[in-house]
Image (cartoon, helix red, strand yellow):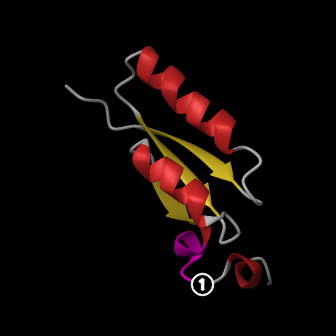
Amino acid sequence: MVPNCTYVTLLSGGGEYVAPTLCLMRQLRKTRTRCGLAVIVNGALPERHRQQFNNASIGLVPLSSLFGRSAKSAARP
């Protein structure tokens, strides 16, 4: 039976943590975890970094899609 789980991490900014996030995925695969990795990203992540995640089969989730509107306006009361 496959567990219904996913590790989720938030990646914001210009991509300073792309390499560590890719390393996290490699380590999860080495341990043969059945859980996937989803990376929540903001709009500032450059396209070249997005492509690296696509090449590594890592799902990207736009932060704005979690709120149905921009994250900035979601923070307002």
Q: Amino acid at mark 1?
A: Arg
Give the residue furthest to the front.
Answer: 48
Magenta residues, start to end: 64-68
Q: Secondary structure at mark 1?
A: loop
Q: Which residue is mark 1?
A: 69
User: Would you place residue 60 above or below residue 18 in this image?
Assistant: below
- Residue 9 versus residue 57: which sits nearer the camera? 57
Q: Main secondary structure of the magenta part?
A: helix
What is the quadrant of residue 31 in the picture? top left
Q: Quadrant of residue 74?
A: bottom right
Q: Residues within 10 Å of mark 1 (few under 14, many from 20)?
A: few
Residue at horizontal 66%, vertical 38%?
A: 19
Residue drawn at x 68%, y 52% is: 11
Quadrant in which the C terminus appears? bottom right
Where does residue 62 sit, x and y in percent of width and height? Answer: 55, 67
Q: Residue at x 44, y 46 (%)?
A: 58
